[in-house]
Image (spheres, helix red, strand yellow):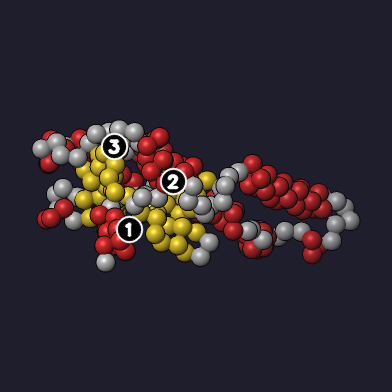
Amino acid sequence: MFSNYCYLYKLNCQFYHYCSALASRSTTPDAHEEDLVRNMKQVQNIKYAMDCERDDIFDTIAFANDHAGFIQCLDLSKGLNVVLAHSGMINHVNKLYDNLTVLTNDNPICFFYDTTFQMGNFFLSLLSYNHPCFYQNKTVLMAVYIHCYTEEVDHRRFFTEMKFCVPNLDSPKTVIVTDREKSIINAIKNHLSSVHHVFCWNHMKQVIQPFIF
């Protein structure tokens, strides 16, 4: 992350020095007329030329700043780590927890977390939950995690961010269903210690099926 800040600082310095050079030329008696900035259109052209020189890291940071209600976390310290969750959905889940007694008679909310989708160099993890107000508790997507690695520290980063957004996530009011991936098991054990953690039945069947048939 420090290198990214250095890049942004360097970019701002380049822009400052460029503007300073234009200002100095405009006050120099022997400045050429074609070197002077005459109107706002030429300023926009300069800005456009600088925008074309930006790299993917700069664009990602700019996108995160423009979509603060959707991008909950952007971490570039170890590859790309992005947590996506709409602020409206986060508020809705918090209200479900507040009204859990009325909605489910204090039955916990069941979440599902899976990392089975890989998009090129990135992994896509989905956090969904059974909505207690829908018929047959239909599953609703809550958050998406885009990451480069699948170690415990990566899943910990996601669960920490989700716990910050939904404090009741780390409580006996929550059930989390996952596969038997060790890094996910350890991340939940160490950082969501109050939840009820169970394994996915479909994954269990895939594991034992070769020994039965």
What residue is drawn where x is 20% and y is 35%? 98
- What's the CA distance linking mark 1 and mark 2? 18 Å
Q: Amino acid at mark 3?
A: Val
Which comes before the other along the chain, label 2 or label 3?
Answer: 2
The image quarter in which residue 35 lies: bottom right
Q: Residues within 10 Å of mark 1 (few under 14, many from 20)?
A: few
Q: Quadrant of the C terminus?
A: bottom left
Per the image, the residue denoted by label 1 is 207
Residue 196: give x, y in percent of width and height: 26, 39
Q: Quadrant of the N terminus?
A: top right
Side (left or right) of 184 relative to 45: left
Any part of residue 13 in sight: yes
Q: Residue at x 46, y 57 (%)?
A: 123
Query: In the visual, does 159 lie left or right of 60?
Result: left
Crowd band around label 2 with a 10 angstrom C-alpha radius: few (<14), some (14–19), many (20+): some
**Looking at numbered disc 2 in the image, what kind of residue is underneath it?**
Ser
| Cα gap from disc 3 to disc 1, whole angstroms | 24 Å
Q: Secondary structure at mark 2?
A: helix
Label 1 secondary element: helix
Mark 3 highlights which residue?
195
